[in-house]
Image (spheres, helix red, strand yellow):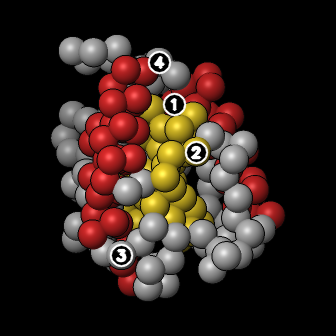
Amino acid sequence: MTPVLLLIDVQNNMLRPPEPVPAADTVGPAIAAVLARARSAGALVVHVRNNGTDGDPDVPGSPGWALIHDAQEGEHIVDKETPDSFDGTTLASLLPPSAPLVVAGMQSEFCVRATSLAALRRGHPVTLVSDAHATYDGSEPAAATSKAVEAELSAEGVTVLTSEMVEFAGH
């Protein structure tokens, strides 16, 4: 079965000024490359978009809320309000049962982590694209936080691969 690409919160507010994630210059192209390969393989692509609340940079309709990559015909956009992209959304109904998922996007320790764990609980094999997810600096530098999330998710059963290693051929 061809993997499904989940692009989580790949929105202007995360990758473009005024406050992009520190790794935006490398993460953005890696996401674009994975998306291009998924599209050329005919994989299902789901764009998950965060709907922020008052004062957030991703309030629906604001410039920060817009997706970096426009959805093409046959691709889906799922709007969410919590870190788990399955919670209160139509995401589960769009995915074939037990379809393998390839996950990329923002933010590593919030939406990427929560959605990956939820997908595992729902019986989906999950691959996290190591160079195509990121976050902001916090108590730890952003890169260290992302690596810690990779280690945690790997221990839970997520496969972690670089963007060059991810394939969308049917299994």
Q: Between tags 4 and 1, which lies in front?
A: 4
The reply to whether the C-beta atoms of the residues labelled 4 and 1 are less than 8 Å apart is no
- Whichever of labels 4 and 3 marks the residue nearer the N terminus, that label is 4
Q: Earlier in the sequence, mark 1 or mark 2?
A: 1
Q: Quadrant of the N terminus?
A: bottom right
Q: What whole-number distance in Å separates the C-alpha atoms at marks 4 and 3?
A: 33 Å
- For label 2, the crowd category at 10 Å Cα-Cα, with few meaning under 14, some 14 to 19 and many 20 or more, is some
Binning the other alpha carbons within 10 Å of mark 4 as few (below 14), some (14 to 19) or many (20 upward) gives: some
Q: Residues within 10 Å of mark 1 (few under 14, many from 20)?
A: many
Dot 2 amino acid type? Leu
Q: Nearer the viewer, mark 2 or mark 4?
A: 2
**For discs 4 and 3, the disc positioned in front in the rendered view:** 3
Q: Is residue 154 left or right of residue 160?
A: left
- In the displayed structure image, the side of residue 146 where residue 7 appears, left or right: right
Amino acid type at image mark 1:
Leu
Q: Are marks 1 and 3 in contact (CB under 8 Å)?
A: no
Relative depth, front residue between 29 and 66: 29
Disc 4 target residue: 22
Judge by depth and name the residue closer to the eye, 97 or 93.
97
Residue 7, percent across and down? 51, 54
**Measured from the top left, where is residue 169 in percent x and y?**
74, 69
